[in-house]
Image (tube, helix red, strand yellow):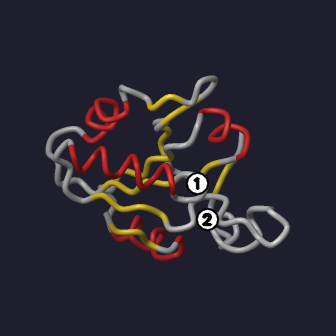
């Protein structure tokens, strides 16, 4: 899996209209923290127990439709869940998996806050919130 900087990921989506953009954070993060505009939600893991979603790969397969070649771009908070979800998709035979480097909220700064150093929101890319 290749990680793309957020601005490069946005250009990738614009250049690949068939790409599937999946936010793999929890439902609460997706709804209340916000999510990239145009992304679809499929949680890699979710509360209250934060167990890995056993339906993640089948849910993505359903969204992808026919073929394993369709590009899939994953995003989470900082990149950790993206890496794990991407590995699961590759193990299931998907071929074109990408991740957004630094995720939606980015890395922690010196005072342990996100959205101040890097990430989708930090870079001013389109996002929405419920």
Element type at marker 1? Answer: strand
Of 54 and 38, the residue lying toward us = 54
Q: Earlier in the sequence, mark 2 or mark 1?
A: 1
Query: Mark 2 Cα within 10 Å, few/some/many (few <14, many 20+)?
Result: many
Q: CA distance from mark 2 to mark 1?
A: 8 Å
- Left or right side of 94 for 50: right
Look at the image and tell me in which quarter the N terminus lies. Answer: bottom left
Determine the secondary structure under disc 2: loop
- Quadrant occupied by the C terminus: top right
Please report the residue visible at 70 percent of the width from the left and 69 percent of the height from the top.
122
**What residue sits right under mark 1 in the picture?**
36
Front residue of 43 and 32: 43
Q: Residue at x 65, y 64 (%)?
A: 106
- From the image, tell me which residue sits under label 2: 120
Residue at 37 percent across and 33 percent down: it is 56
Please, is residue 97 above or below residue 93 in the view?
below
Q: Would you call the spot at circle 1 few (<14 residues within 10 Å), some (14-19), or many (20 or more)?
A: many
């Amino acid at each position: 899996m290749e990680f793309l900087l957020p601005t490069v990921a946005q250009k990738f989506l614009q250049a690949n209209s068939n790409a599937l953009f999946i936010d793999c954070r929890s439902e609460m993060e997706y709804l209340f923290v916000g999510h990239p505009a145009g992304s679809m939600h499929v949680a890699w893991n979710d509360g209250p127990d934060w167990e890995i979603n056993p339906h993640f790969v089948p849910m993505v397969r359903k969204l992808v439709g026919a073929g394993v070649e369709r590009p899939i771009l994953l995003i989470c908070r900082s990149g950790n869940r993206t890496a794990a979800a991407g590995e699961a998709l590759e193990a299931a035979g998907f071929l074109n998996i990408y991740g957004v480097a630094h995720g939606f909220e980015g890395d922690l700064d010196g005072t342990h806050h996100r959205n101040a150093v890097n990430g989708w929101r930090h870079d001013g890319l389109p996002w929405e919130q419920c």
